Image: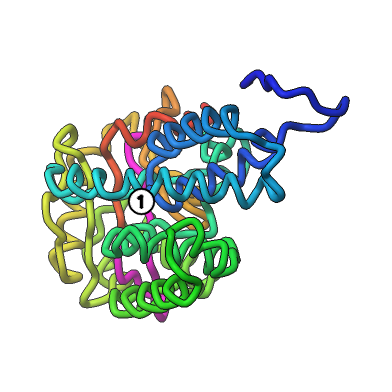
Amino acid sequence: MIDDQEPHAPGAPDAFEANRRYLGSVAYRLLGSFTDAEDVLQDAWLRWQAADRTTVADPRAFLTTVVTRLCYDQLGSARARREAYYGEWLPEPSVSYADGPDSPAELAERGESVSLALLTVLEQLTPAERAAFVLHDVFAVDFEEIGTSLERTPDAARQLASRARRRIRAGGRHPGDTDPGAHRRAVEAFAAASTRGDILALMDVLDPDVAWHADGGGIVRAAARTVHGADRVARLVAGMVAKWFTPDAAIATAAVNGEPGLLWYDRTTGTVHGVFAFTVTDGRITAAYVVVNPEKLARIHPLPV
C-alpha cells in the first residue's frame, strides 16, 4: 500500500487512495492496458504528493485532470507502438468469473461497462476524442472539467465527444446495442459448436459478414489480419479446435469486460491461454475478439481446478 505522507484526520483516507479505483478505471478505459494504467497511477500519485493541496478545492476533479493528461501524453506514443505491433493490437481484457477470484481488473474498478469491442473501436479515435468521449459518456464528467483536462474550451470538448460518437457509430458499435440474453445464448451456441468442431453449427450462429480479430502479439500464432465471412471464420475455428484442444484444454464461460465471453484454459492448472469476446446482433455473432498474447493474459487469475 502506498504510504500517505500528509497528515489527515484519523480514519479519513487520503484523497488519492479514496479515488484510486476510479482513477484506475479512467486510465484503463483511456489506454486499453492495465500495465499502462498502473504506470499512469504511479506517476499521478507522485504528482499528488508534490501538489500544494491547500489550493485544491476538488481533489477528485484535480486527480482526474492529472490522470487524463498523463493518459493523453501516453496515447500518442502508444499509437506509434501499436502501429508497429505484429498483427492486430487488441486491448487487454478484463475478466471476472461467476464464482471465485476476480482478475486484477479490480484495479480499474472493473472495466465491465466498456466492452472489448468498444475499446477496440476507441483505438480509431484521436487522443482528444477518446478522452472527451470516455470522460463524458462513461464517467459523466461535465464538459467544463473535460475542457480543463484537455486544455480546451467546454464547447471544444463537447465537439470532440460528439465527433467521437459519430466515429464510433460509423465503426458499427455503440454501448448497449445488444440484448444480454441473446448475447449469452449466441456465445453458448458458439462454444458448443466449437468444441464439437461442427462447422455447420458454427455457421448458424455466425453472421454472414462476421469479423474475426485476433491478437497473438507475434508470440502465439494467430491470424495477423481480420478474417471476414462465416464460412472462413467457421473453418478457422474448427482448425483451431483441432490443433489447440488437447485432453488438458477446456472452454469456460466468463464475463469479459462485463459481457458474456469465453476462456480457453488448461484444466490441470487453470491457466488461461485465450480470451474470447463477442458482439452479437439479432442473435448472431457479428464480431469476435480473441486475445491469446500471453503478455495480455498474465494478470488473469487461474480458474479453480
Q: Residue at x 43, y 48 (%)?
A: 69
Q: Is residue 89 above or below residue 199?
A: above
Q: Is residue 133 visible?
A: yes
Q: Is residue 243 above or below residue 205?
A: above
Q: Is residue 106 above or below residue 270?
A: below
* Residue 266 horizontal/vertical position (percent): 37, 30
Please identify the residue farthest to the right as the structure is shown.
10
* Residue 200 horizontal/vertical position (percent): 23, 68
Q: Residues within 10 Å of mark 1 (few under 14, many from 20)?
A: many
| Residue type, label 1 | Phe
Looking at the rendering, which quadrant does residue 55 occupy?
Answer: top right
Give the mark count. Answer: 1
In-image side of 74 versus 144 (left or right): left
Q: Is residue 192 visible?
A: no
Report the front residue among 163 and 221: 163
> Which residue, given by chain and number where applicable, does mark 1 sit on?
276
* Residue 245 horizontal/vertical position (percent): 27, 38
Looking at the rendering, which quadrant does residue 246 occupy?
Answer: top left
Q: Residue at x 45, y 65 (%)?
A: 132
Report the front residue among 124 and 299: 124
Looking at the rendering, which quadrant does residue 283 occupy?
Answer: bottom left
Residue range of the region highlighted in magenta in the rendering? 273-288
Q: Quadrant of the N terminus?
A: top right
Q: Secondary structure at mark 1?
A: strand
